[in-house]
Image (cartoon, grey):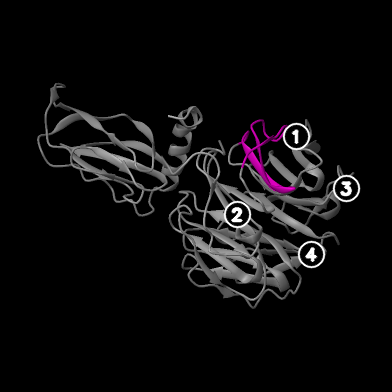
Amino acid sequence: MHPILKRLLPVAAAAALLAGCGKGITPVTPEPGPPLSSLVISPGADTLRVGQSRLFTAVARDTSGNVTTTTLGWTSSDPAVVTVNAAGSASAVGEGLARVIVAAGGKADTAAVFVYADTGWVAQTSNATEDLNAVFFDPAGRAGWAVGNAGVVLATTDAGATWTRSIATTYSLHGVWFTSRDEGWAVGNAGTVLRTTDGGAAWTRLTNVGETKNLMHVHFATRDTGWAVGTAGLVLRTFDRGASWQKTYPVVTNLNSVMFAGTRDGWAVGDGGAILGTHDRGLTWFRVQPAITSQNLKGVWRRSAALAVAVGAQGAVPMTVVTPDSVAWQLQSAGAANQLEGVCFPADQVGYAVGLNGTGIVLRSDDGGMSWQPQQPSAQFKLNAVFFVDALRGWVVGNNGLIRHTAHGGH
């Protein structure tokens, strides 16, 4: 097992499997037979590469506590990721997280299995030549969407092994966010706000936005509550699932990214080093003064009320620090030659930034954004956006339809 996978698997598996509870996983019905006092599967977790197999076993004890032999029933929570036969032999068939389940005599136990396709950053075939500007994946890391120029929308249900292409609008799209496997939002030029309720099979443009400025990013904190930001300082907000939108212009400079921790506290960043904050759902905004950088800021990621990291031109990396009185911003650098476009922190200490330094670049931080190390995405074009579902599994998208994926934290 890869050492990084071995260290992070329990966390990643637990988070993803808990996120999947109630989403189509049929409850286990224990196999009939003599009643048991316990049933324990072994191993309790494993990591497999696609094509590999692993034999799982289980120890059954009768009501007296003695080891006994009984008929075991073996199932998989997601056969698209792992299949398992009647002997407990599990085969890895597709990337993702799944549970191998054993049941007998009124008892059941499960093992978490993480399946990966390959090491490092892997090229995925996008079926697109348009520049891709944003990407989003559901917590299980199987369903994902990317949007880009000329209204292109890409969708996958197998972690990006295959992507389907559609054109949702004539306008270029710059942001995408999903609140469930079925419902999602995309924003773009000329005030375009699109909504889907069928996982991206069809998109409808909302006619109640009342705006023609370009929208650069969208974020929803809940199914009902979301924000979009754009050129000339535009901030849009909805508290009723898009039935109505309100707009404000807290600054005149372009805003490029917005993200909230919960529904009240949010940050937005933009050109000229603009950093805006709100504590009232975006009804009012304040600008961080004095500015800590004059560089254009392209992306912001907020993990909590205290932790946020932004990225921008010439390697600018503003980040929050907790002071005795409040949360303040300080400036770090990822290297002046790095023009950064997007950022994602799947864990408090682990984050990724993407952009351009001659060719497309991916940087990784393991100390909350204080320092950054380059990775090798083999990307000849600029990378515009990054999204990770946990510290291991992420996707980056860029110009000319470029998509790269890692299931190993980029290693």
4 and 3 marks in contact (CB < 8 Å): no
Would you say 338 lies left or right of 79 here? right
2 and 1 marks in contact (CB < 8 Å): no
* Amino acid type of the residue tagged 3 in the rendering: Ser
Pair 3/1: label in front: 3
Mark 4, residues whose alpha carbon is within 10 Å: few (<14), some, or many (≥20)? many
Mark 3, residues whose alpha carbon is within 10 Å: few (<14), some, or many (≥20)? few
Residue designated by label 1: 321
Distance between mark 3 and mark 2 Cα atoms: 29 Å
SS at mark 3 in the image? loop
Residue designated by label 4: 231
Mark 2, residues whose alpha carbon is within 10 Å: few (<14), some, or many (≥20)? some
Distance between mark 2 and mark 1 Cα atoms: 22 Å
Provide the residue span drawn in magenta.
Answer: 348-376
Distance between mark 3 and mark 1 Cα atoms: 19 Å
Q: Is residue 153 visible?
A: yes
Q: Sequence order check: which comes first, mark 3 or mark 2?
A: 2
Distance between mark 4 and mark 3 Cα atoms: 17 Å
Residue designated by label 2: 221
4 and 2 marks in contact (CB < 8 Å): no
Whole-percent x, y for residue 103 in the image: 21, 39
* Amino acid type of the residue tagged 2 in the rendering: Ala
Q: Sequence order check: which comes first, mark 3 or mark 1?
A: 3
Q: Sequence order check: which comes first, mark 2 or mark 1?
A: 2
Whole-percent x, y for residue 379 in the image: 63, 49
Residue designated by label 3: 294
Would you say 401 lies left or right of 267 here? left
* Residue closest to the far left: 34
